[in-house]
C-alpha cells in the first residue's frame, strides 16, 4: 500500500454526533420519530439521501423537490452552527499522532468523505496540512456506496486503486472501497461488515497494519 484514504465523519472526527443533533431538531419540528439507530443508517450517505431516510417516518403529504431542498438546507444551517464549536482539540491526540506517523512513514494520505462540509471541518480542526488530497461531497455526483469519492482521491494522489487502503466506519463506505478495488479497513460499525478486509479498534492500530 502506498496511499491511505480516510473517511472523515466517524473516523477522524465525531461529526456523526453533530449530524444526529441537527437531524433530530428537524425531525422533532416535523414530529417525525428519529433515534440513534436510524442515525446509524445515515453514516456515509449524502445529505439528500439522509433526508429521504428521515422522511420514511413522515405521515403527511409528499414533499416537492424544492421543499425537500429547503428541509436539507435547514438541517445544514443547524449543522454548520454546531460545527463552529470545532477546534484542533476536537481531534483526539491519537488520531493526529497516527496521521503524523503515517506521513513520516511516507504514505500518501487523503480524505474521502461524502460531506460537502469537509473543507470547513478540516480548517476548524487544522487537519488540512496532513493530507495530499481531499475528495469530498463537492466533487462527486454519486455518494457512497458508489466508489467515485475514493477513485477521485486515488487519482489525485497519483496512485492506482490497488495501492490504496480506505479507512471507514460506515457499511456504505466499506462497500465503496471494495467497489473501488481498494483494501477496506473497518473501524466501529465498519469493522463488522462482511466485505471488510481488516478490522481495527482504534486508529493507532493502523501503525501495525502499515509499518
Ligand atoms: P453533509 P463521511 C458523511 O460524512 C456523513 O457520514 C453522513 O452522515 C452525511 O450525510 C454526509 O457526510 C453528507 O454530509 O451534509 O455535510 O454534506 O462519513 O463520508 O465523512
Ligand atoms: Mg463516516
Image (cartoon, rainbow, N blue to C red):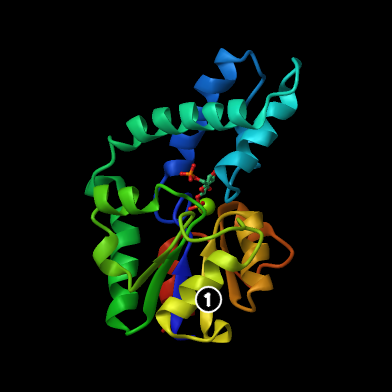
- Residue in view at x 68 percent, y 64 percent: 175
- Residue in view at x 54 percent, y 69 percent: 150
Q: Can residue 71 be seen in the rendering of this structure?
A: yes
Horizontal and vertical percent position of residue 26: 54, 21
Vertical placement of residue 162 versus 113, above or below: below
Vertical placement of residue 116 versus 99, above or below: above
User: Which residue occupies the foreground of this view, 122 or 35?
Assistant: 122
Horizontal and vertical percent position of residue 207: 40, 75
- Residue in view at x 47 percent, y 72 percent: 153
Residue 110 occupies which quadrant of the picture? bottom left
Query: What residue would you read off at disc 1?
Result: 165
Is 97 situated left or right of 211 in this image?
left
Residue 38 occupies which quadrant of the picture? top right
Horizontal and vertical percent position of residue 93: 28, 56
What secondary structure is found at the residue carrying circle 1?
Answer: strand
Crowd around label 1: few <14 · some 14–19 · many ≥20 (10 Å): many
Vertical placement of residue 174 versus 121, above or below: below
Vertical placement of residue 15 versus 187, above or below: above
Horizontal and vertical percent position of residue 82: 35, 32
Amino acid at each position: 500500500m502506498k496511499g491511505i484514504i480516510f473517511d472523515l465523519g466517524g473516523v477522524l472526527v465525531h461529526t456523526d454526533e453533530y449530524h444526529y443533533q441537527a437531524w433530530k431538531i428537524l425531525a422533532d419540528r416535523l414530529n417525525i420519530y428519529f433515534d440513534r439507530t436510524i442515525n446509524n443508517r445515515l453514516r456515509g450517505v449524502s445529505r439528500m439521501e439522509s433526508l429521504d431516510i428521515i422522511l420514511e417516518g413522515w405521515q403527511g403529504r409528499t414533499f416537492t423537490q424544492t421543499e425537500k431542498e429547503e428541509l436539507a438546507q435547514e438541517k445544514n444551517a443547524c449543522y454548520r452552527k454546531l460545527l463552529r464549536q470545532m477546534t484542533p482539540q476536537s481531534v483526539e491526540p491519537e488520531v493526529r499522532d497516527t496521521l503524523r506517523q503515517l506521513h513520516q512513514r511516507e504514505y500518501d494520505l487523503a480524505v474521502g468523505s461524502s460531506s460537502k462540509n469537509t473543507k470547513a471541518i478540516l480548517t476548524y480542526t487544522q487537519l488540512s496540512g496532513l493530507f495530499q488530497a481531499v475528495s469530498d461531497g463537492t466533487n462527486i455526483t454519486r455518494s457512497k456506496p458508489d466508489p467515485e469519492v475514493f477513485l477521485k482521491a486515488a487519482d489525485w494522489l497519483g496512485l492506482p486503486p490497488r495501492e490504496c487502503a480506505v479507512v471507514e466506519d460506515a457499511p456504505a463506505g466499506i462497500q465503496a472501497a471494495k467497489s473501488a478495488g481498494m483494501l477496506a479497513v473497518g473501524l466501529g460499525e465498519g469493522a463488522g461488515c462482511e466485505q471488510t478486509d481488516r478490522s481495527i479498534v482504534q486508529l493507532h492500530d493502523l501503525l501495525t497494519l502499515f509499518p
